[in-house]
Amino acid sequence: MKNIYLPQLGKIKRVQKETSDVKTFTLAPLRGAGFTFFLKEKIKFIPGQFLEISVFGTGEAPFSISSSPTQKDLQISIKDVGSVTSALHNLRKGQVIGLRGPFGNGFPIKDIRGYDILFVGGGIGLAPLRSLINYILDKRKNFERIIILYGAKNPEELVFKDELKGWERRKDVELLVTVDEGDGKWKRNVGVVTTLFEKIKVNPKKAFAFVCGPPVMIPFVIEGLVKIGLKDERIFANLERYMKCGVGKCGHCNIGPKYTCLDGPVFSYKEIKGLSKEF
Amino acid sequence: MRDWILYKEHTFPLIRRLNKHFEIIAPVEGKGGDIVFDPITSEHDVVLDFTNTIMPPKRFFFPQFETLFSWKGKEFTLAPPRGAGLTVPLKTKRRIIFGIRPCDFSGILFLDGYYALAYEDNYYFTRRNNTLFILLGCNEPQEHCFCLSAGTGPFLKRGFDIQLTDLKDRYYVQIGSRKGKELIERYDYFFRPASREEKEENIQTVREAERKFKEEVDFDLVAKKMENEEVPESLWQELAVRCQNCGGCSYVCPTCFCFNLIDRVTGKEEGKRMRTWDSCTFSGYTRMAGGYNPREEKKDRVKRRFYHKLVYEPQQFGMHGCVGCGRCVTTCLGNINMPRVMHEIMK
Amino acid sequence: MKKILTTCTYCGCGCGLYLQVEGNEVIGVTPSREHPISRGSLCVKGWNIHEFIQHPDRLRTPLIKKKGGFEEVSWDEAFNLIAEKFKRIKKRFGPDSLGVLASAKCTNEENYLLSKFTRAVLGTNNIDHCARLCHSSTVVGLATAFGSGAMTNSINEIEEADCILVAGSNTTLQHPQIGSRILNAVEKGASLIVVDPRTTQLVSFALLHLKPRPGTDVAWINGMMHVILKKGLANLDFVKKRTENFPALKRKLAKFTPQYVERITGIPKEDLKEAAGIYARAKRAILIYSMGITQHVTGTDNVLSLANLTLLTSHVGRPYTGLNPLRGQNNVQGACDMGALPDFYSGYQKVSNAPCRRKFERAWNVKLPQNKGLTIIEMVREAGRIKGMYIMGENPALSDPDITHTVEALKSLDFLVVQDIFLTETAQLADVVLPGASFAEKDGSFTSTERRVQRVRKSINPVGEAKADWEIICDLSKKMGYPLNYESPEEVMEEIALLTPIYGGIYYDRLEKTFGLQWPCWNKKHPGTTFLHRGSFSRGKGHFTPIDYKPAKELPSKKYSFILTTGRLYYHWHTGSMTRRSSTLHREYPEGFIEMNLQDAQRLGIKNKEMVRVISRRGKITIQALVGELIIPGTVFIPFHFKEAAANLLTNPVLDPKAKIPEYKVCAVRIERIER
Ligand SMILES: Cc1cc2nc3c(=O)[nH]c(=O)nc-3n(C[C@H](O)[C@H](O)[C@H](O)COP(=O)(O)OP(=O)(O)OC[C@H]3O[C@@H](n4cnc5c(N)ncnc54)[C@H](O)[C@@H]3O)c2cc1C
Ligand code: SF4
Ligand code: SF4
Ligand code: SF4
Ligand code: FES
């Protein structure tokens, strides 16, 4: 029987600073005596899936893969909020971590071909969306419009700044960015991410929406999307829960009869509507 | 399959014989007179006349505190590894659980189902698969038992390896699995085939036991009312003010499976990852980094515990999350417990 | 795997539990169902007790501080150094320059031995322990009123009461089993009255909740007695037959009219009258109190007042009826019983009483000091005079009031020895650190809050080179030239029984077959005592002490406008050295907080979960605000478990003049919003 709790070993190939408290880590397989690594074959995953990352001695935590399976590098982007995340932030290139996964269902990439895709992200919530965005951009002709609405607390806290610039330059991507509090130099929208809804026109019949951000943001965004006219089954949200095992055993991530780590983390609004009180 | 008879005077010799080849875990008397499941050193330790144990034998498959793996070596703090690595301490012995009650064994069947969903929990199954269960049905249900309503006792129809029914001077022995059959065949000189009268006597004993239940609840009715949101929030609020967040109801429950994973540093370059029992009654169980907690209020946690057992688990894989053992009645410091809550809902 | 029956090492309830042992590792817990207190249940701390026992942070070898850092050394080296230093200090400055702190976490036998070591070997009565900080006012107060300072009843009697008055005790959280008994009593129809400035869990079940301003307890108690007398609800027959000094009390009560009391305490006069009526009329009335009453500059006064109240209504000396101080630590009762106090030998036999002293001198075969020793706070205050200290299993560097001062005092000692299981804040200041054994690693006995003496059993070997604390004391004593030769704690208990009348019948063979015996247990046939003062009081007649209301020492001022009160949380134990190493417990409350009323918070512009600065005349801390309505305006609460935001940097070390208990429950603070 496979040991579902035993991590594989990996190392940090590159660390990139995104904001004062977010870093993107590029991970690489680790070869050594006595180990078998699934990383030998490149990790196969779907955008939206996550990895359980161990910093031995501190603990393990789940992180969405922020790179696209169409890209060479395997990346996670992490905000420093607690013990594991800050231990990760203290790691340097070449240091060893543990990985389990990929786990979770991922985005429904098969069902969305030929549609307009609307992304709504908040803060570090752009990480899993970035995986799907880059996946779609690498298969651009299979999709229609791509609209990205992204918000952060202030201009400094916007993640993937270089990539945002790249998307902005592309003619085939509609990107709108907002911040809760601007600074002197900020010329764009100020306000929560839902204020961007007024600035775009979406044909609800032709669109899928993907939402990821802090727990307080999600219900408001969904409400906005429903108002625009999107059907419940075309709205998807990445839910975050306190997770330990990632494989449907420890119970922590349970929302009603669903397990975020198995049935999610990507849920359609239709699935979670009844559980609204809990998410 | 054919049923057998084991005379009570042959029970200890049988256990002695089995103990040579198996680790035997059976009800034994602790220092304070409590009956607890523990490995026996001699067959004379075994107590067969007991009201059910304080805790189910769940911990022999899913220990309260367990090392999943340990690590050693410099590589875990710096640089790529050379030689050292992760070790898994999981060892198993061939085991027999002797004298487990049907409700507790139903708890094991429940965990079998749960721990196999999507991914198999190898720690649980390595131990589980090495174990043979000899059940002892209940002629005398206790005050708080409601396994009859839960469909998990006082005797089981299937699922067990071997089930014993107390017929005063002898045990009526039923076989429910290949493992059980092989064991009886290996030690067939302890047993003789049951007669037609004994078969009838067994049926009577079961019927009689079923008539003795004082506690009766309607799982379907309760689940329906809960699903239809017919339960007033005030009930959960009333329960919540009584809850003292001890976690006991989860710890003693044969079907509770939640755990936490923690790391312990044991030396300069070594440590271990452990798992420890957890309970959904704790606020830290769902609190996320940054302080956001989807079940911050105690009311939501108490409510969710009962929804999980009575509504979600049946939806998820067709079994109640309660086997009617009555342990939470004894252990709760706030007198919250499954039968009480069910009666409140049935009202 | 095997299960070993023992007694919980956290609180004074004294639950019986089995430790699940595999190899030499404790991997779980099972509550005892037969045990009269645990009855098949435990609180969250008991359920997770296995987590700290073999924690990697446990001390494993003796340590000596050399050039600022600790070095691992052999037991011999450590003992030699201690013996040499103590001898030198004793010679140069006299025996009273040495001080000892015993431990309410250690066993009876260990506390007895440490008391013997202090008096017979070091030659001083300077021994005390944390009971000073929680219930010394009880010991002094109840000794005056009744002659014996312990719970008059047993825990299970609470279930049968028809009125329960709980004053200054957050019972469900601090004494979970007792809290559970109160709940049961209420389910059976008992009336519950809670007196507490905070809205505790018990309040949900209470008929009445009185919220006095912290530090005004004498006033409401006197007020209740005033009402009782006026309504003719006092039992004057009882007063006449079994008490003394009533007229003096009566005179004192005259001015405590409900109006007057309302002005002082903030308790509406109607509520006070109602509470007095319910309590006085009850047939079986249990009065429960804890640190909310004792930890004041007027701690002894508060206790005396409660005793007056029970005497006036004859609510004492009967089954299901009495006055019950809840002792916090698992063995704080035992440590007091064993004479880990500056003025008593075991069993409250006075050091100053010549026949007592002669008895111990004969038994221990040595001349004993006569003058009363110093208390815990005095030892630290007099650090100039105290040159060397021996601290067993206590952490004054976090638990004493005004710890800045305490830490300075400990640092200024010539020589400090700390015996503990973790490198606590205090141990870090020591010159020598000795690794003791946890409760799972040794034999012995604990005495619970209901005076129940019960066994602690060794389940595993001590971690590393750690040793049972009783062995450490014996070994050290030998090095200092006074051999203490005991084969086992059982032998120590035999000596205790011989010299201590209230423990006269307590022997291990009797504890083996039962879940303990409740003292007084006079001889081997005596069954123990469930409730005290039947027929007559320990001192003969119950004594009324008229008490006047005196305000707390530090009242809110313009600059420091809030009253700070401190206490514990359910999930943590004192300075957190055990509980913060249990993942489940630590996760519930990973950090400290200050609880404050919504009105106050709004006025100061403070939001829930925001960080604030709390400042007193002695220190300041930064801590998260918990805003709500569970606490009255003007009062704030901080738990003292967290070293990062140590409440005791703020508290006021003023002492009750009689019991020398510090005023943890009242000091004035200012709260500042931290600008973002
Ligand atoms: C499917 C999934 C995908 C995720 N993807 C990402 C991602 O791509 N990038 C990313 O950055 N994060 C992601 N997260 C979140 C990430 O898992 C958490 O940030 C991480 O688990 C935090 O772990 P930690 O050990 O650092 O925090 P911990 O040390 O565990 O700190 C959090 C805990 O400490 C306590 N705590 C901490 N702060 C407070 C406070 N202020 N008040 C009260 N209690 C507090 C709480 O008990 C909390 O549970 C994802 C989560 C999930 C479930
Ligand atoms: S919920 Fe209570 S009665 Fe039901 S199985 Fe669990 S412990 Fe037993
Ligand atoms: S046993 Fe009772 S008090 Fe303890 S957590 Fe469960 S419901 Fe709450
Ligand atoms: S801390 Fe107190 S109530 Fe909790 S288990 Fe221990 S003795 Fe019992
Ligand atoms: S994270 Fe453990 S069950 Fe989902």
Image: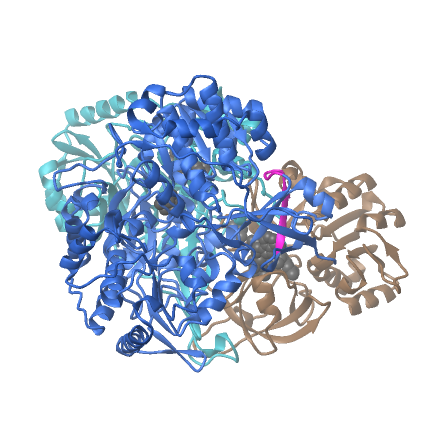
Chain colours: A brown, B cyan, C blue
Residue ID at (81%, 54%) = A180
- Quadrant assignment, res C238: top left
Q: Is residue C47 left or right of residue C257?
A: left
> Quarter for ligand 2?
top left
Quadrant housing the N terminus of chain C: bottom left
Percent x, y of residue C199: 55, 36
| Residues shaded magenta | C623-632
Q: Is residue A62 visible?
A: no
Q: Is residue B288 magenta?
A: no
Q: Tell me which secondary structure the magenta stretch mostly adopts.
A: strand
Quarter occupied by residue C576: bottom left
Viewed as shown, does residue C267 lie left or right of A268?
left
- As drawn, C272 above or below B282: above
Query: Residue A37 in the image: x percent, y percent?
Result: 50, 71
Question: Does residue C356 sit above or below B265 in this rendering?
Answer: above
Instruction: Answer with left or right where residue B99 lies relative to residue A274.
Output: left
In the image, B70 versus C224, the foreground residue is C224
Residue sitting nearer the eye, C102 or B295: C102
For residue A216, above or below residue A142: above
